[in-house]
C-alpha cells in the first residue's frame, strides 16, 4: 500500500543540522558517506529527512526533477534551493549514492512518443523514498522524528504563478487570497480525517494547492484557480473506484450543467446561475456531438481566433479521440470545425463578442473553480467529504442527495470573485 505525498517545503525541525554530526552519523551507515556539506545543503537535507520520516519508509514522495527556479519565499519559507536539492551534486543524489534513498526519475514529456499518449499513457512524475529502515534510523540519530518535526509558517494552499511561465509570483494578500487560504486549510484538514483510497493507494496528508495565474502582471487573483495531484491525476473510470473510509463513492459525480457557459450568462446579465443545456446545436444530436461541441465552445473562449481554435481542437481530437479525428479528416461534413464555430456563435449571439478572448476563458475557469470549491467547503461544513475534480464533485452515494441540494443552492460571493467581462 502506497501513500502518495508531494515534497513538502514547509517541514523542518526546531534545531538546525550540524555538519560534524551529519558526517559522523552518516559514516556509521556508509563508509563513502560524503563529508562536504554546505549550510544550504544541510537545510535541504533536514527538509528531505523530515519528509521521509513524516511519510514513513514505505511511501514514495513526488517532486519535480526538471530544472526550475527556486520557489519564492511565500511558498518556500525555508529558502530551499531547487538545484541544491535535485542537481547532479544535490542532496537527493548524495543520499541515493549511499543507499539512503531510492529515486525513480520521471518522464520528460517532450520525449514521449505521440503514439503513447494516443494509447492512454500518463507521464510519470519523479519520486524518492527511503531505501529501508536504516534511513529512518539515520534521521532519528540526527534528532528527526515525528515528534520533532514542525511546519514552518507560510502560505501553502494558494499559488500564484506567472502568466505562461513556471515561476511563482509573490503578492499582497487580499480578502480573496486570505479567504481561499483559510477555506482550503479547513477543507484539507477535514479530508485528512478520512481514509481516501484508490487502487490500494491511500491519499494521506492531503494538501491541495490552488493554482492561479498572473496574466496581467498585477499580482491580483483573476485567472484559473484549480488544483491537481492526488485523485485528480487518475482517469474518470479509475476514480469510480475511490473509497472513503471503506465506502465506495457514487458512480456518477455531481456537476453543474454546462457550467462555463451558464456562469458566463449569469455574470454578463447579473442573474442567478441556471442549469440550462448550452452545448446543443440543431442537427448535432447525441453524446458524441455534445462532447465535441462542449470542447470546441470552451476552446473558443480560450483561443485568440478561429484558426487557433481549429488547431487546438484538432490536436485535442488526435490525442483524446483519434477515431473521431480520423473521421473528421476523412469526411468534412461529419463535423466541419469552422462551420460549427459559426453555429456556436449564432447559438450564443448574446455573448458572441466574448469569444476568442483568452483571458475571458481563464477568468471563467477562475469563477468555476471558486464555485466548485465553494460547494466542497459547504459540504465540509455539513460533515460531507466531497472531492473536487475540475468542474465535478465526488461524494459517497449516501451523501449524494444532500450534496446535490448544497450544489443547487450555492451562490458564489460576487464581491470576492470578480469577472473581467
Image (cartoon, rainbow, N blue to C red):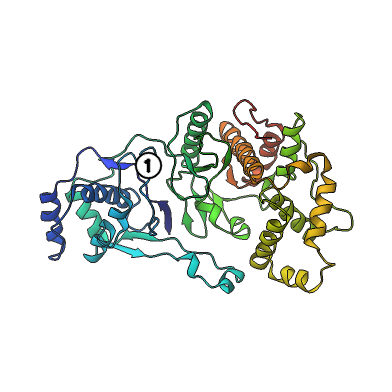
Q: In what element is the residue under mark 1? A: loop
Q: Is residue 230 above or below residue 169?
A: below
Q: Is residue 256 visible?
A: no
On-image quarter of the N terminus: bottom left
- Residue at the spot x=22%, y=51% of the render? 41
Choose between 140 and 156: the one closer to the eye: 156
- Residue at the spot x=48%, y=59% of the render? 200
Q: Quadrant of residue 270?
A: top right
- Residue at the spot x=10%, y=50% of the render? 20
Residue 28's spot in the image, x, y percent? 12, 60
Residue 242's spot in the image, x, y percent? 57, 53
Q: Is residue 196 above or below residue 87?
A: above
Choose between 97 and 247: the one closer to the eye: 97
Q: Is residue 175 visible?
A: yes
Q: Is residue 149 above or below residue 102?
A: above
- Residue at the spot x=24%, y=51% of the render? 45
Q: Quadrant of residue 240?
A: bottom right
Residue 81's spot in the image, x, y percent? 30, 49
In the image, taking residue 77 as reference, residue 200 lies left or right, namely right
Residue denoted by label 1: 72
Q: Is residue 337 above or below residue 73?
A: below
Q: Quadrant of residue 72?
A: top left
Amino acid at each position: 500500500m502506497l501513500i502518495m505525498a508531494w515534497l513538502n517545503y514547509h517541514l523542518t525541525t526546531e534545531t538546525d543540522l550540524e555538519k560534524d554530526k551529519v558526517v559522523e552519523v552518516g559514516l556509521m551507515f556508509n563508509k563513502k558517506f560524503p563529508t562536504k556539506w554546505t549550510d544550504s545543503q544541510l537545510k535541504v537535507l533536514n527538509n528531505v529527512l523530515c519528509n521521509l520520516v513524516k511519510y514513513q519508509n514505505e511511501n514514495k514522495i513526488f517532486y519535480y526533477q526538471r530544472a526550475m527556479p527556486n520557489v519564492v519565499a511565500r511558498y518556500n519559507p525555508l529558502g530551499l534551493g531547487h538545484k541544491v536539492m535535485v542537481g547532479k551534486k544535490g542532496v537527493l543524489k548524495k543520499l541515493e549514492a549511499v543507499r539512503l534513498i531510492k529515486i525513480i526519475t520521471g518522464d520528460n514529456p517532450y520525449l514521449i512518443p505521440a503514439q503513447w499518449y494516443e494509447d492512454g499513457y500518463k507521464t510519470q512524475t519523479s519520486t524518492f523514498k527511503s531505501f529501508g529502515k536504516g534511513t529512518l534510523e539515520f534521521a532519528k540519530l540526527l534528532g528527526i522524528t515525528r515528534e520533532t518535526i514542525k511546519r514552518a509558517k507560510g502560505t501553502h494552499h494558494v499559488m500564484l504563478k506567472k502568466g505562461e511561465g513556471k515561476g511563482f509570483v509573490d503578492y499582497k494578500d487580499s480578502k480573496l487570497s486570505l479567504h481561499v487560504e483559510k477555506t482550503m486549510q479547513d477543507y484539507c484538514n477535514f479530508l485528512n480525517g478520512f481514509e481516501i483510497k484508490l487502487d490500494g493507494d491511500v491519499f494521506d496528508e492531503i494538501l491541495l494547492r490552488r493554482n492561479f495565474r498572473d496574466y496581467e502582471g498585477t499580482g491580483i487573483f483573476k485567472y484559473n484557480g484549480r488544483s491537481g495531484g492526488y485523485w485528480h491525476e487518475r482517469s474518470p473510470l479509475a476514480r469510480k473506484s475511490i473509497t472513503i473510509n471503506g465506502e465506495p463513492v457514487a458512480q456518477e459525480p455531481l456537476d453543474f450543467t454546462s457550467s462555463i457557459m451558464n456562469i458566463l450568462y449569469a455574470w454578463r446579465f447579473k442573474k442567478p446561475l441556471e442549469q440550462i443545456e448550452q452545448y446543443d446545436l440543431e442537427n448535432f444530436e447525441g453524446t458524441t456531438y455534445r462532447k465535441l461541441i462542449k470542447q470546441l465552445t470552451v476552446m473558443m473562449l480560450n483561443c485568440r481566433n478561429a484558426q487557433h481554435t481549429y488547431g487546438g481542437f484538432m490536436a485535442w481530437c488526435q490525442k483524446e479521440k483519434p477515431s473521431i479525428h480520423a473521421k473528421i479528416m476523412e469526411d468534412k461534413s461529419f463535423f466541419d470545425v469552422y462551420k460549427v464555430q459559426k453555429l456556436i456563435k449564432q447559438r450564443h449571439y448574446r455573448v458572441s463578442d466574448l469569444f476568442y478572448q483568452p483571458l475571458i476563458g481563464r477568468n471563467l475557469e477562475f469563477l468555476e473553480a471558486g464555485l466548485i470549491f465553494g460547494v466542497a467547503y459547504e459540504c465540509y461544513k455539513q460533515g460531507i467529504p466531497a472531492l473536487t475534480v475540475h468542474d465535478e464533485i465526488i461524494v459517497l452515494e449516501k451523501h449524494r442527495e444532500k450534496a446535490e441540494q448544497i450544489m443547487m443552492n450555492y451562490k458564489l460571493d460576487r464581491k470576492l470573485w470578480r469577472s473581467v467581462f
